[in-house]
Image (cartoon, helix red, strand yellow):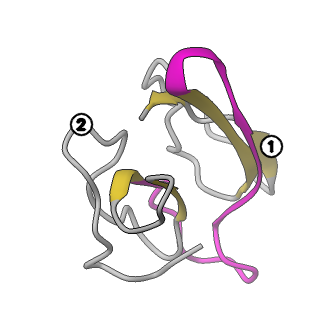
Amino acid sequence: MTDSANFATTAGAFQRSLAGGYDAFVVKLDPARAAQLYSTYAGGSTSQYDPPDDNANAIKGGCAGTGLLGGLTYSDNLPDHARRVSAKRSGPRRFIPHEAEG
C-alpha cells in the first residue's frame, strides 16, 4: 500500500491517482524487470481509520494478461471491477476491485 500522491501509473490504469489515505497498488514489470508494463492504484477515499483504509494482500494472474486483486478495505467508495461502488458499510470488508488487463 502507498500514500504517495506521485506513484507512477500507466496509461489505461484502473485508477490513475491516490483516492485518499492509503491505497493498494499493482505493478506488472517486464521479464527483465526494467520497465513497468502496468501500474495502478486501487483504493477508496476513506482515510479515518487505523490501520490504513485499503490493504491488498492477494493477487492472481489470469488468462490473456489479466489479474485479480483482493484485500481488505475500510473505504465506503472502493469501486469493483465494473467500477460500481458498494453500499455504505461500517467497519472493514473484503474487496476484489478489478480484473485488469496489463
Q: Would you name the residue on which mark 2 appears? A: 12
Relative to 11, 70 lies left or right: right
Residue drawn at x 47%, y 23% is: 84
Count of marks, rendered view: 2
Q: Secondary structure at mark 1?
A: strand
Q: Residue furthest front?
A: 32
Q: Quadrant of the N terminus?
A: bottom right
Q: Is residue 84 magenta?
A: no
Report the Cα–Cα distance between label 2 and label 1.
25 Å
Relative to 61, 102 lies left or right: left
Q: How crowded is the residue under tag 1: few (<14 C-alpha within 10 Å), some, or many (20+)? A: few
Task: Choose between 51 and 34: the one closer to the eye.
Answer: 34
Relative to 64, 8 lies left or right: left
Q: Would you name the residue on which mark 1 appears? A: 94
| Residue 70 point in image, percent of width and height | 74, 43
Q: Secondary structure at mark 2?
A: loop
| Residue 63 point in image, percent of width and height | 63, 16
| Residue 37 point in image, percent of width and height | 36, 48
Q: Quadrant of residue 98?
A: top right
Residue drawn at x 50%, y 44% is: 77
Q: Look at label 1 and name its amino acid.
A: Arg
Q: Look at label 2 and name its amino acid.
A: Gly
Numbered tag placed on residue 13 in the rendering? none
Magenta-colored span: 40-65
Residue drawn at x 29%, y 78% is: 5
Residue drawn at x 47%, y 18% is: 82
| Residue 85 point in image, percent of width and height | 50, 30
Q: Residue furthest left?
A: 11
Position above or below: 5 against 19: below
Q: Is residue 53 magenta?
A: yes
Q: Quadrant of residue 45?
A: bottom left
Task: Choose between 6 and 93: the one closer to the eye.
Answer: 6
